[in-house]
Image (spheres, coloured by chain):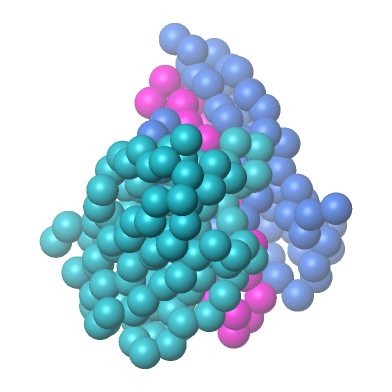
């Protein structure tokens, strides 16, 4: 079992839908949580970064961490076709700058 | 400010050939990384350099070597390419003391 599990999808939703992307993990030492967005044939780009538990909001995006359940989520409100991409979660132990990545979830937002 | 740049963008090699993938960053970052990305496998760390003058193996280092030429540049060398090394290679960097990484556009390598 990988340390970080992420459903590869694809997840297909209509434009305007609320999207929920999730990762589960097994290592309770993870404290730093990142979401990256990767468009087709491009490099990953950092979307959201959170420390420990709680929520963080940035425009249409909300990152949520539930350390008790070892579960993190990325919510996208009012999804747009331009949100179509692969979303990778990543997490790190404090003091270790080598993140563990999930395999990514492919999201398709159709008009 | 170009961020992280990688050359070449595409490469086709024959089995047994060698090549070097180049990576450079202009953000004055301390740490640099090389990943490969394969379908269904996600990003796997090949080598990293926590600071200039140091390099360490990652999850999948076999068949690769690296050189941290200076603070800006981190190269990945395939001495004798194998079809199993067909992949997309990403370089990343981080300032040091932070957890988020900045990625280059990738090099698509095919070994026949």
Where residue A6 appears, x then y in whole percent?
71, 43
With B87 as the anchor, is A68 left or right in this view? Answer: right
Q: In which quarter of the image is residue A32?
A: bottom right
Residue A90 among magenta residues: yes
Chain letter for the blue part: A
Residue A107 seen: yes
Question: In terms of depth relative to the viewer, which is nearer, B64 or B49?
Answer: B64
How many numbered marks appear?
0
Vertical comparison of B101 with B85: above or below: below
Where residue B21 appears, x then y in whole percent?
33, 58
Chain letter for the cyan part: B
Where residue A18 appears, x then y in whole percent?
58, 27
Q: Give the range drawn in magenta.
A: A77-100
Residue in the image at 34% along x and 87% along y = B52
Which quarter of the figure is the N terminus of chain B placed in? bottom left
Residue in the image at 53% along x and 21% along y = A108
Q: In which quarter of the image is residue B34?
A: bottom left
Residue furthest front as drawn? B16
Residue furthest top as drawn? A111
Question: In terms of depth relative to the viewer, which is nearer, B31 or A58?
Answer: B31
Residue A90 seen: no
């Amino acid at each position: 079992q990988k340390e970080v599990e992420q459903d590869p999808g694809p997840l297909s939703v209509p434009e305007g839908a609320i999207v929920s992307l999730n990762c589960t993990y097994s290592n309770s030492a993870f404290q730093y949580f990142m979401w990256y967005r990767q468009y087709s044939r491009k490099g990953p780009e950092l979307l959201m970064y959170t420390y420990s538990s709680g929520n963080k909001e940035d425009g249409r995006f909300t990152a949520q961490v539930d350390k008790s359940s070892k579960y993190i989520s990325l919510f996208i409100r009012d999804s747009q076709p331009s949100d179509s991409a692969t979303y990778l979660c990543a997490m790190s132990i404090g003091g270790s700058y080598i993140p563990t990545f999930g395999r990514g979830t492919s999201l398709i937002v159709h008009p | 400010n170009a961020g992280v740049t990688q050359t070449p963008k595409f490469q086709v090699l024959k089995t047994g050939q060698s090549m070097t993938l180049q990576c450079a960053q202009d953000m004055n970052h301390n740490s640099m990384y090389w990943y490969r990305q394969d379908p269904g496998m996600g990003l796997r760390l090949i080598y990293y350099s926590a600071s200039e003058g140091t390099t360490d193996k990652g999850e999948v280092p076999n068949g690769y070597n690296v050189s941290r030429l200076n603070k800006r540049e981190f190269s990945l060398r395939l001495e004798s390419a194998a079809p199993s090394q067909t992949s997309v290679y990403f370089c990343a960097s981080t300032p040091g003391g932070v957890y988020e990484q900045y990625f280059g556009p990738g090099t698509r390598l095919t070994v026949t």
